[in-house]
């Protein structure tokens, strides 16, 4: 059975972008693949995090995984920092990556833009991500569009290792949804919806109460005109709302266009809000149950135990191939 691995940073409240771009695919893939899903807390600290907030966000992302339908009986769910092999392998990969290729990463350029002091961790972020993926020799990595460049670097590092130390790593493939790989901000369709955007009106958080969701959608920016048509180049704002609609209502873009022909944006936005609320309500109820039941920590401990077996074996093999003296 081929392997799937992905991670989401514990860097804030998860958004509808994370759900549509990534988590919905996690849930689907677990039916046919061996899956590893982790909360990446060590990546989250590449930008400053308050310790209390980091703890809360880590637990919240893990609980949202389960609430969204990731089943710990089918998939391993764990926290990155619970498996020290990630840090160890991340270090080994910093020695294979070139400064020039890390400097070209758009996420690094975006997150460091205009800052005086840039953490070295932000710079080597992609080598830790490569370690995350290659530790499990993953075949498929479900991510949104913004992560394609990091995945390409992971493939390069795997090839570089194989060329230098002998064939060992599988070369992983990305896996992105056809519609919704890049959900845009509600206030500006030129930027991706992001949980670390300081303006909460720009995103729908998975835990936003129904009335907040309705308000955010009614105030979402729309293009001039009144036609509900999918055309990302000319109608980026409406096209973005249509992608969200398509995922939450299970309708194709064409079906949505037909439904609102001649009706304008008002009716479209109102019904969109109800579809989003209906999609998130069961998830929110399940989330509350998981947080209050105390089962989360057992799930995470078991997940870390399961994956450590695979991760530790990979680190040992890699170190042996690189020429480290192995303890005897
Ligand atoms: P941050 O703002 O802290 O960088 P983020 O909201 O971009 O966070 P990540 O933890 O970086 O979220 O991403 C988790 C997963 O969600 C990744 O696979 C990423 O590609 C996907 N994702 C994030 N934002 C979007 C979006 N707007 N549309 C589709 N997929 C997204
Ligand atoms: N960089 C990713 C999060 C991430 C990840 C991974 C995704 C860290 N490690 C391994 C897939 C596989 C992000 O910012 N979304």
Image: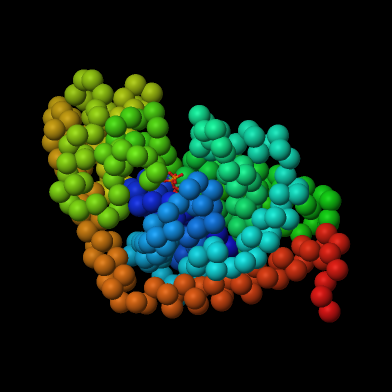
Residue 322: image quadrant is: bottom right
- Give me the residue at 79% from left, 63% from top: 319
Q: Position of 29 compared to 267: left or right? A: right
Residue 201, percent across and down?
Answer: 26, 39
Q: Position of 44 compared to 193: left or right? A: right
Residue 29, percent across and down?
Answer: 47, 60
Q: Is residue 251 above or below residue 295?
A: above
Residue 245, percent across and down?
Answer: 27, 43
Residue 242: image quadrant is: top left
Q: How is the image coloured?
A: rainbow
Q: Is residue 237 above or below residue 214?
A: above
Image quadrant for the C terminus? Answer: bottom right
Q: Is residue 275 visible?
A: no
Q: Is residue 30 visible?
A: yes
Q: As rendered, which of 298 and 199 lies closer to the eye?
A: 199
Image quadrant for the N terminus? Answer: bottom right
- Give me the residue at 58% from left, 43% from top: 119
Q: Position of 208 compared to 196: left or right? A: left
Residue 31, percent across and down?
Answer: 45, 66
């Amino acid at each position: 059975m081929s392997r799937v691995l992905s991670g989401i940073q514990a860097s804030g409240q998860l958004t509808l972008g994370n759900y549509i771009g990534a988590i919905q695919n996690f849930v689907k893939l677990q039916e046919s693949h061996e899956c590893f899903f982790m909360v990446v807390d060590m990546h989250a600290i590449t930008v400053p995090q308050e310790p209390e907030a980091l703890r809360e966000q880590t637990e919240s992302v893990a609980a949202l995984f389960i609430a969204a339908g990731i089943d710990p009986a089918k998939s391993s769910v764990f926290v990155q920092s619970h498996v020290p092999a990630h840090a160890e392998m991340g270090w080994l990969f910093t020695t294979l990556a070139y400064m020039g290729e890390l400097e070209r990463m758009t996420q690094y350029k975006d997150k460091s833009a205009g800052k005086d002091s840039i953490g070295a961790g932000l710079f080597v972020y992609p080598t830790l991500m490569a370690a995350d993926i290659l530790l499990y020799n993953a075949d498929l990595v479900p991510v949104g569009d913004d992560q394609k460049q990091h995945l390409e670097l992971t493939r390069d590092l795997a090839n570089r290792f194989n060329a230098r130390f002998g064939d060992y790593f599988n070369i992983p493939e990305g896996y992105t949804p056809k519609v919704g790989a890049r959900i845009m901000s509600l206030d500006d369709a030129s930027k991706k919806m992001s949980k670390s955007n300081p303006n909460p009106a720009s995103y729908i958080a998975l835990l936003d109460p129904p009335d907040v969701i309705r308000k955010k959608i009614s105030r979402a920016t729309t293009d001039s005109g009144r036609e509900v048509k999918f055309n990302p180049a000319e109608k980026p704002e409406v096209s973005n709302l249509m992608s969200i609609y398509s995922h939450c209502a299970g309708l194709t873009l064409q079906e949505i266009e037909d439904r609102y022909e001649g009706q304008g944006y008002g009716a479209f936005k109102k019904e969109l809000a109800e579809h989003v609320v209906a999609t998130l309500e069961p998830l929110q109820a399940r989330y509350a149950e998981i947080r209050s039941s105390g089962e989360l920590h057992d799930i995470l401990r078991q997940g870390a135990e399961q994956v450590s077996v695979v991760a530790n074996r990979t680190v040992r093999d890699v170190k042996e191939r690189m020429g480290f003296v192995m303890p005897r």
